[in-house]
């Protein structure tokens, strides 16, 4: 018996573990030390300055953007 509200893993689409940062429960918390360190590295390479008081969600989005700009993205 299948419940339509049962969370499923896998399948043909993007993994459900890859949530949009704006949907994160902890997205409003301050960025982690690891995120800040990586942003610092990427921002220096991109010649940008990023405020240090960003949230986890903002940090994730910033990392993705800077990875694309610097060519350090995956894929």
Image (tube, rainbow, N blue to C red):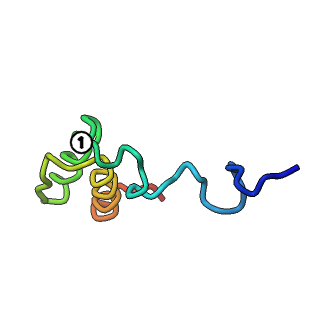
Q: Secondary structure at mark 1?
A: loop
- Tell me if 9 is positioned left or right of 60 in this view: right
Q: How many marks?
A: 1
Residue drawn at x 55%, y 48% is 17
In the displayed structure image, the side of residue 51 where residue 15 appears, left or right:
right
Q: Is residue 39 left or right of residue 19?
A: left
Furthest-top residue in view?
33
Residue 31 image position (x, y, % from top left): 26, 42
Q: Is residue 14 left or right of residue 52?
A: right
What residue appears at the point 31 percent right and 62 percent down from the top-left corner? 65
**Viewer-proximal residue, 25 or 9?**
25
Where on the picture, by quarter, is residue 64? bottom left
> Picture coordinates of residue 41 (x, y %)?
21, 46
Q: Residues within 10 Å of mark 1 (few under 14, many from 20)?
A: some
29 relative to 65, above or below: above
Give the percent coordinates (x, y) of residue 32: 27, 37
Q: Is residue 41 above or below residue 62?
A: above
Residue at (14, 54) in percent of width and height: 50
Q: Position of residue 35 (x, y in %)?
A: 28, 42
Q: Which residue is mark 1?
A: 30
Compared with 4, 55 (above or below) is above
Instruction: Identify the residue at image location x=11%, y=56%.
Output: 49
Q: Nearer the viewer, residue 73 or 39?
A: 39
């Amino acid at each position: 018996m299948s419940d339509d509200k049962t969370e499923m893993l896998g399948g043909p689409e993007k993994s459900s573990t890859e949530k949009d940062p704006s949907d994160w429960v902890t997205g409003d918390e301050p960025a982690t030390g690891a995120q800040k360190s990586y942003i610092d590295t990427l921002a220096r390479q991109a010649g940008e300055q990023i405020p240090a008081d960003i949230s986890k969600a903002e940090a994730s989005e910033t990392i993705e953007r800077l990875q694309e700009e610097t060519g350090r993205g995956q894929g």
